[in-house]
Amino acid sequence: MKTEDKILSALEEVIDPEVGVNIVDLGLIYDVTVNEMGKARIEMTLTVPECPLADQIVDNVKRVSAQTPGVKEVEVQLVWEPKWTPARMNDQAREEIRSRQTLMT
């Protein structure tokens, strides 16, 4: 398995606290690259630019990614284009959100 794929798998542990779903399933991760020196670069977005928990999410992304074998350094780049929309979520994220809404009613 490529290091980029291992990072993506590890990032499934990072939950967006406001939504309660992992950031990979939400479609917040746009790109993951790792160079030959072990520096990982993660391009991601948030559901809204003014997310009050942005620092917490980015810190969790860095922490989890840094634990991946072969990764020596992690850089997270927050981007706002293309803008995140619910269409970026996968079916699993949609189902989790639906289940949470059902439990709340």
Image (tube, rainbow, N blue to C red):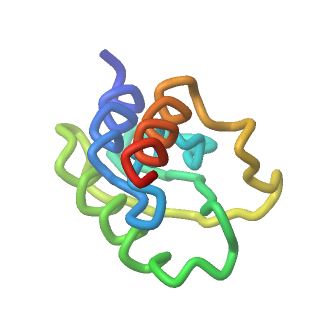
Q: Residue furthest top?
A: 1
Foreground of the two, 16 or 62 = 16
Q: Residue furthest front?
A: 105
Residue 63: image x %, image y %?
Answer: 24, 62
Q: Residue furthest right?
A: 82
Residue 18: image x %, image y %?
Answer: 45, 66
**Above or below, comparing residue 79 to residue 23 in the picture:** below
Residue depicted at x 41% and y 46%: 100
Q: Name the quadrant containing residue 55.
A: bottom left
Residue 82: image x %, image y %?
Answer: 82, 51
Foreground of the two, 93 or 80 = 93
Residue 7: image x %, image y %?
Answer: 34, 38
Q: Is residue 47 left or right of residue 67?
A: right
**Above or below, comparing residue 12 to residue 76 in the picture:** above
Q: How many marks?
A: 0
The N terminus lies in quadrant: top left
Q: Is residue 61 left or right of residue 79?
A: left
Foreground of the two, 36 or 60 = 60
Foreground of the two, 102 or 54 = 102
Residue depicted at x 35% and y 46%: 37
Residue depicted at x 35% and y 54%: 15
